[in-house]
Amino acid sequence: MAQKPINPNNGSGARLYLSRFAFHSLPGRTGEVEAELRKLSAMVAKAGGKNPRILHAHFASPGAADVIFEQEAPDLQTLETQIKKLTDSGDFQIWTKKMSSLLAESPKREIYLVSGSS
């Protein structure tokens, strides 16, 4: 049986990128990390980011992140513009200092091209 070719769009014909930031919180600090990520979500939305969401690991393999922050973008140029707008803000600089005190290691960013089923 022949496989369908992978379509690099979200099924609607439009590409969609997913930016994912993985956070490893210090023991007992996951709630605080989530609270700070809610602040980040508001800053991302203000910078034009789409569909920011926070994922809390319920079950995970050892070494997996405790909390994931995601946002969507139609293309990499838009994502980079939003990231620059965000990281240039004074509020983000203050937020970063606070957030780093809650983490066991630096967060890791991954960017995915969402593959549709059609």
Image: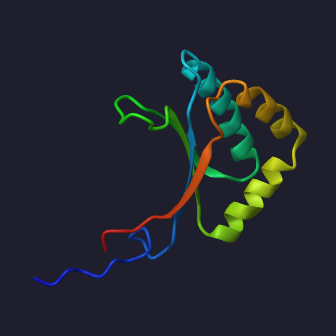
Where does the image place residue 98, in percent across and percent down from the top left? 77, 26
**Farthest-out residue, left:** 1
- The image shows a total of numbered marks equal to 0
Where does the image place residue 5, in percent across and percent down from the top left? 30, 82
Q: Is residue 30 above or below residue 47?
A: above
Residue shown at the point (45%, 64%) measured from the top left: 114
Residue shown at the point (37%, 77%) measured from the top left: 7
Depth check: give the residue in front, 54 or 20: 20
Residue 69 in which image quadrant: top right
Say left or right for 28 vs 11: right
Residue 32 in which image quadrant: top right
Q: Is residue 67 above or below residue 71?
A: above
- The colour scheme used to paint the residues is rainbow
Question: For the N terminus, which image quadrant?
Answer: bottom left
Where does the image place residue 46, in percent across and percent down from the top left? 75, 45
Say left or right for 100 vs 92: left
Depth check: give the residue in front, 111 or 42: 111
Say left or right for 77 vs 20: right
Depth check: give the residue in front, 4 or 14: 4
Residue shown at the point (80%, 31%) measured from the top left: 97
Question: For the C terminus, which image quadrant?
Answer: bottom left
Where does the image place residue 105, in percent across and percent down from the top left? 63, 35
Say left or right for 1 vs 70: left
**Farthest-out residue, right:** 90
Residue shown at the point (69%, 37%) measured from the top left: 40
